[in-house]
Structures are given as C-alpha cells and as structure tokens.
Image (spheres, helix red, strand yellow):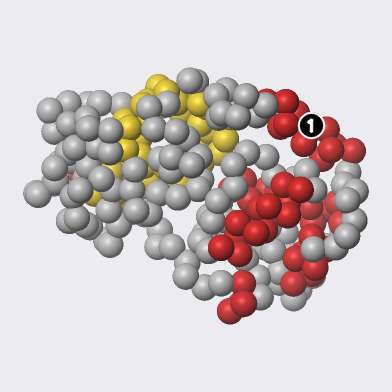
Amino acid sequence: MMKKTLFGTAVTAGVILGAPQAADASISDHGQMERGDVNSSVAELQDKLKEKGYFNGNTGSTFGPRTESAVKDFQADNGISSSAGDYFGVAGPETQAALGGSSDSSSDSSEEVAGESTSESSDSSSEGETMTMEATAYTADCAGCSGITATGKNLNEDPNANVVAVDPDVIPLGSTVKIEGMGTYTAADTGGAINGDRMDVHVPTKSEAYSFGRQDVEVTVVD
C-alpha cells in the first residue's frame, strides 16, 4: 500500500487533496456532536436515530450530511432548539436525552420513511440506494504514488479511469455508482480517512484535484 501522503491523508492508490481532518473529540469531551465529528459516539447516535425512523441506510462513525439531516428532523419533531448547543443540526445533551428516552413513537412521516427504507434494504444490499456523500478528489499523479487501487487497478496506466474510493461498509468494492452531474464510476479503492459518508473521486491531475475541493454529491449505487 502506498504510504506517502499530502496533508496527512492517504488513499490506496494516490493522494487526496483538500480533505478535512477527522475530529478526535468524543461526546464525553464536549457534550455535543456536530457535522465533521468522527467517533464511536456518532455511531451510537445514528443507531438511535435509525431506531426512531429518522436515519436510513448504513450507520458508521462519521457525522455527515445524512446524520445532520436526521438530527434536524428529530429536533423539529420534538421541539428541540436552544442557545445551549441544541440548535438545529447539532446533537447536544437535550437531543441525546430525548433520543435515549423510552418513547417508541415518531412522526407519521418518519414512520413512513422507515418503512420505505426497510423494504428497499430487504435484499441486504446497497443496490439502488441514493445517498448524499461528502466528496473530495485524489490523484495518482504524484511522485512515489503506486497508482494501484485496493482492487488492483493501475491508475497510472489509465489516468482517466472513473474510479472512486469508498468505505466498503457503505458501498461494496466493485459496485457501480452514479454521481449526479458527474457520471458513472466504479468503487475500486479505499482510504484510511474514507469512512462513512466520505468518498474520494479519482481525477487525472493534481490541479484537477485541487479544483474539485470538497462538495456534497448525490450518489446512487447502480449495482
């Protein structure tokens, strides 16, 4: 595996540019969770949101856009909004206490969404699922980069390959995914910082990777 990194983040085949640093703080440190946090407390939060019908799809340790949206919906339905950290999208003590309660009820719309999610995932795969993911870009166009992906594809031999690095627990390696406005890609790579709702899009050059920046994209698992 290629170990040379830029900005402290590595993927199997190359370097990722402009990616955010993972948050090491846990819920016990700050009493709240927000977008960008990566820790085990986020996974517990997602599990509770999923139990109550607010979070769909696979859970993980990253507080991404889907988690933020689920928290907002839960807070709106439960009238949670204060100056003490429980403003929309941030899971503070009041939100966590409400999630940890014994009530099994949720809004009618949330129950309907949960039912739809169950039927869609009944085949125990991600096929056909559309999700919002945080995307950055990486390239094999760098000194010392092997260009070999986690599935063995050589990106130096095929610099225009439509490949993305994913968390295999969210999108299985080998899957074909469609990124809205960008095209169809193959999930053929992984990366140490690519967890949960994170994705890295392979591009031919460093300049393209820098230009890509960081953006939220709609991703559909085709097969």
Residue 27, x across and y down, in percent: 61, 72
Q: Which residue is mark 1?
A: 115
Residue at x 82% of width, y 40% of height: 110
Residue 189 at x, y = what percent?
A: 32, 38
Per the image, label 1 sits on a secondary structure element best described as helix
* Res. 100 image quadrant: bottom right
Reply above or below: 130 against 189. Answer: above
Q: Amino acid at mark 1?
A: Gly
**Residue 157 in view in this figure:** yes
Task: Relative to 43, say whether 109 is above or below.
Answer: above
Residue 8 picture location, percent across and down: 28, 62
109 vs 1, nearest the viewer: 1
Who is closer to the viewer here, 41 or 214? 41
Give the residue drawn at x 43%, y 40%.
168
Q: Position of residue 57 (x, y in %)?
A: 63, 38
Q: Quadrant of residue 56?
A: top right
How many residues crowd mark 1 within 10 Å: few (<14), some (14–19), many (20+)? few
Looking at the image, residue 185 sits to the left or right of residue 216; the answer is left
Residue plotted at (55% across, 24% down): 127
Res. 203 in view: no
Q: Is residue 175 left or right of residue 52?
A: left
* Residue at the left extreme, as displayed: 143
In this rendering, would 140 be left or right of 70?
left
Vertical side of 104 occupied by 217: above or below: above
Q: Residue at x 80, y 48 (%)?
A: 52
